[in-house]
Image: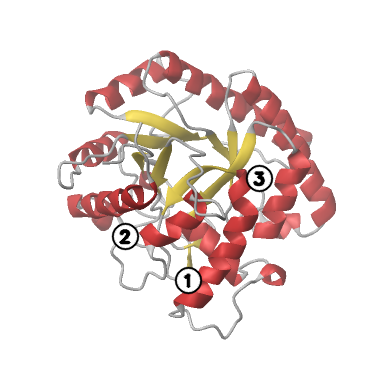
């Protein structure tokens, strides 16, 4: 039986799209409890990826890393990748916005080092995005991409001081990251050894449909989305371009639509693992990211994570949801994993 990549659940879906203008936040402890309780044929989750976001985590609170480590350890889980709370700033814009962005990267890396020292985190990255809208970016694409790249380079220098890698999430709502071609362009422009791409199967599928970047659409407008051959060819185009940069990976499902809730902009809709309208063959299509063009395992990361943001609380508070997710993750590892 394969024991790599390790299987992680995400805690930030308890926060993203929640809050005063949506449904209540799901507590960090509740998410840990449901993650730890999930089990399929004796297999359980190995860990969690976390968002360094209030009210789950307060980076300024004393001894916060120790408190988080104790909570996670209690459930025999590890911590992997972490989302830096960079949205009070921006990678493009004023000097003050860029300063806040970089300070949040520094705080996140510092928190990661504390967790590493406490023994609960042995792999994973710090996740960032441009924290800038597509609309704002489009006012000066060339100049804004350059500014984002400049900010990312500074962030990489900060992360390197903590031995961390940064992963830029490809999502259609982030300026300069809203298409597969713009994402490659940005990575090439940053040109640092400790930055890469975070692929999410739902978000990156929207790249093929050209949402927010119709100039880079791969699937034609009149495509039959039940045509697996067309979908697989489009996925191959995207993954061939971005796989060399990919250092973090989210397993997910998508039905070809966009969705937003709370204050979150519309982006690739996350569907439940068992959604009959899902267009992805999760285990098969994960292979486009986990194997190279010759079919060999890349082993580019030690863990994979399920991302399912903006589900209703009634779904997220149902234990069966997490068992179904774990079952899908196990199939990915069976098809594209390895033993160590």
> 158 above or below 134?
above
Q: From where the camera sits, is residue 278 visible?
A: yes
Q: Nearer the viewer, residue 284 or 22?
A: 284
Mark 3 and mark 2 in contact (Cβ < 8 Å)? no
| Mark 1 or mark 2, earlier in chain | 1
Measured as percent of width and height from the top left, residue 314 is found at 24, 57
The residue that mark 3 highlights is 130
- Quadrant in which the N terminus appears: top left
> 37 above or below 314?
above
Pair 1/3: label in front: 1
As drawn, the label of residue 256 is 1
> 129 above or below 166?
below
Q: Residues within 10 Å of mark 1 (few under 14, many from 20)?
A: many
Q: What colour scheme has been applied to the protein in the rendered image?
A: secondary structure
| Mark 2 or mark 3, earlier in chain | 3
Measured as percent of width and height from the top left, residue 107 is found at 56, 23
Measured as percent of width and height from the top left, residue 168 is found at 60, 43
Q: Secondary structure at mark 1?
A: loop
Asked if residue 63 lies left or right of residue 83, the reply is left
The residue that mark 2 highlights is 273
Pair 2/3: label in front: 2
Q: From where the camera sits, is residue 261 visible?
A: no
Q: Residue at x 37, y 58 (%)?
A: 283
Asked if residue 49 lies left or right of residue 38, the reply is right
| Distance (Cα) linking label 1 and label 2 | 14 Å
């Amino acid at each position: 039986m394969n024991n790599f990549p390790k299987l992680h659940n995400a805690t930030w879906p308890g926060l993203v799209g929640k809050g005063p203008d949506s449904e209540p936040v799901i507590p960090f402890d509740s998410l840990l409890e449901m993650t730890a309780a999930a089990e399929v044929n004796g297999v359980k989750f190995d860990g969690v990826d976390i968002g360094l976001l209030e009210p789950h985590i307060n980076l300024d609170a004393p001894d916060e890393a120790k408190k988080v480590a104790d909570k996670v350890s209690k459930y025999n889980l590890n911590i992997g990748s972490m989302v830096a709370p960079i949205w009070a700033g921006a990678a493009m814009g004023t000097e003050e916005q860029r300063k806040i962005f970089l300070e949040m990267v520094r705080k996140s890396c510092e928190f990661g080092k504390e967790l590493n020292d406490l023994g609960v985190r042995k792999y994973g990255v710090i996740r960032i995005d441009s924290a800038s809208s597509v609309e704002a970016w489009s006012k000066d694409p060339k100049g804004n991409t350059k500014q984002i790249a400049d900010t990312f380079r500074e962030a990489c220098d900060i992360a390197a001081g903590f031995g961390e890698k940064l992963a830029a999430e490809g999502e259609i709502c982030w300026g300069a990251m809203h298409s597969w071609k713009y994402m490659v362009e940005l990575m090439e422009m940053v040109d640092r050894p400790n930055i890469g791409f975070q692929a999410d199967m739902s978000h990156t599928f929207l790249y093929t449909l050209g949402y927010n970047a119709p100039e880079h659409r791969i699937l034609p407008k009149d495509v039959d989305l039940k045509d697996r051959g067309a979908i697989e060819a489009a996925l191959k185009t995207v993954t061939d371009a971005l796989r060399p940069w990919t250092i973090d990976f989210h397993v997910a499902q998508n039905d070809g639509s966009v969705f937003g809730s709370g204050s979150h902009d519309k982006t690739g809709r996350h569907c439940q693992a068992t959604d009959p309208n899902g267009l992805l063959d999760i285990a098969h299509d994960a292979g486009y990211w986990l194997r190279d063009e010759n079919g060999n395992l890349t082993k580019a990361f030690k863990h994979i994570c399920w991302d399912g943001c903006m589900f209703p609380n009634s779904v997220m508070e149902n234990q069966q949801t997490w068992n179904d997710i774990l079952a899908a993750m196990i199939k990915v590892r069976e098809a594209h994993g390895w033993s160590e």
